[in-house]
Image (tube, helix red, strand yellow):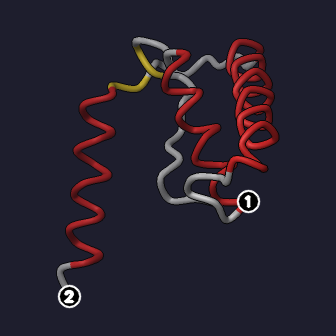
Amino acid sequence: MCRNIKPLFNFEPPASEEEIRQAALQFVRKISGFNKPSRANETAFLSAVDEIAAASSKLLHALETYAAPKNRAQESARRRARSTQRFSN
């Protein structure tokens, strides 16, 4: 999985449509190998981003959990600490 795609489920406040779209964009970039598609591929690229964002949004709204929502700031700090530890050696 692409390292830049972060979990979006069970956060307070819930993931925004922009966050979902950014994750979809990262996914399409990863599987297509394009950071920015050529004009010939731009329509297909953007269509894929839209479809994946829609499917992701539908999934996130359909999922249920009994766990307490996670705090974005705490999760972000946890990821930074893991990254610092991993790359400090």
Farthest front residue?
39
**In the image: residue 75, left or right of residue 45:** left
**In the image: residue 3, left or right of residue 76:** right
Which quadrant: the N terminus?
bottom right
Report the residue marked by disc 1: 32
At 77% from the left and 49% from the top, the residue drawn is 41
Front-most of 21 and 77?
A: 21
Quarter of the view holding residue 63: top right
Q: Where is residue 74 in the image (x, y as percent from the top left)?
A: 26, 35
Which callout, 2 or 1, points to the residue nearer the camera? Answer: 1
Quarter of the view holding residue 58: top right
Does residue 65 lie above or below 73 as drawn?
Answer: above
Q: Where is residue 40 in the image (x, y as percent from the top left)?
A: 78, 49
- The mark nearer the N terminus, 2 or 1, is 1
Q: Label 2 is placed on what type of residue? A: Asn
What is the distance, in whole Å, between disc 2 and disc 1 at their CAs? 32 Å
Label 2, secondary structure: give it: loop
Report the residue marked by disc 2: 89
